Amino acid sequence: MRLEDVLALLLCIVMVATSAVAVSSTRLMRAAIAFAASLFIMGLIYISLGQTFLGLIQIFLYVGGVAVLIVFAFLTAFSTEEVEYEKSITESAGIALGLLTTLLLAIIFLKLSENIKAPAVEVTVQEVGKLLMTRYLFQFEAISILLLASIVAALTFVLKGRK
């Protein structure tokens, strides 16, 4: 096994662990931080696979934007005390089943990827920008409007809560 494969496997294991913490934690702030960590690790996985631009977009957009927005919503919507919720047995069983499925899919992926040698495709930032502004313009603008609407909704929710 090459060093790159070991690094990718280690990053995948850490990502699954942080995702499990994000799903299973009873404290919202701990879950949000674990979610942000798993998004950051996903960006590192993209970078380790040679997709630097995609990895940086993952880190800047999702960790820097979405995860911070979630933490902002938690801090403004709830009091300074930690909000906890009850855990159930089905939640623990669901987490165990999810981890088992992830492990099985990783084994299948590793076995199948040994036989597949895909050619490396070099994509420039200019080509991605051209595609975003031509072919995927509607999807790009729809996501922008969705993010703007979620920010306005979060601020409306916060302002109603303060009255």
Image (spheres, rainbow, N blue to C red):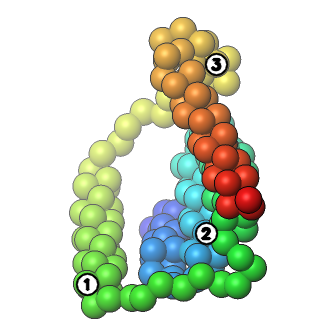
Spatial CA distance of label 1 from label 3 is 44 Å
Q: Find residue 100 and report its image quarter.
A: bottom left
Residue under label 2, please give it. 32
Q: Find residue 134 and report its image quarter.
A: top right
Q: Measured along the vertical axis of the image, is residue 122 above or below residue 103?
A: above
Which amino acid does the dot numbered 3 rest on?
A: Gly
Q: Earlier in the sequence, mark 2 or mark 3?
A: 2
Q: Measured along the vertical axis of the image, is residue 82 above or below residue 43?
A: below
Spatial CA distance of label 2 from label 3 is 31 Å
Count residues near mark 1 (Cα–Cα under 10 Å), then give few for <14, some for 14-19, many for 20+.
few
User: What secondary structure is found at the residue carrying circle 1?
Assistant: helix
Q: Residue at x 38, y 37 (%)?
A: 118
- Between 38 and 149, which is closer to the camera in this rendering? 149
The reply to whether dot 2 and dot 3 touch (C-beta < 8 Å) is: no
Spatial CA distance of label 2 from label 1 is 21 Å
Q: Give the side of residue 98 with respect to residue 128, left or right.
A: left
Count residues near mark 2 (Cα–Cα under 10 Å), then give few for <14, some for 14-19, many for 20+.
many
Which amino acid does the dot numbered 1 rest on?
A: Thr
The reply to whether dot 1 and dot 3 touch (C-beta < 8 Å) is: no
Residue under label 3, please give it. 129
Q: Earlier in the sequence, mark 1 or mark 3?
A: 1
Is there any visible trace of residue 33 in the rendered image?
no
Which amino acid does the dot numbered 2 rest on?
A: Ala
Is there any visible trace of residue 136 in the rendered image?
yes
Residue under label 1, please give it. 90
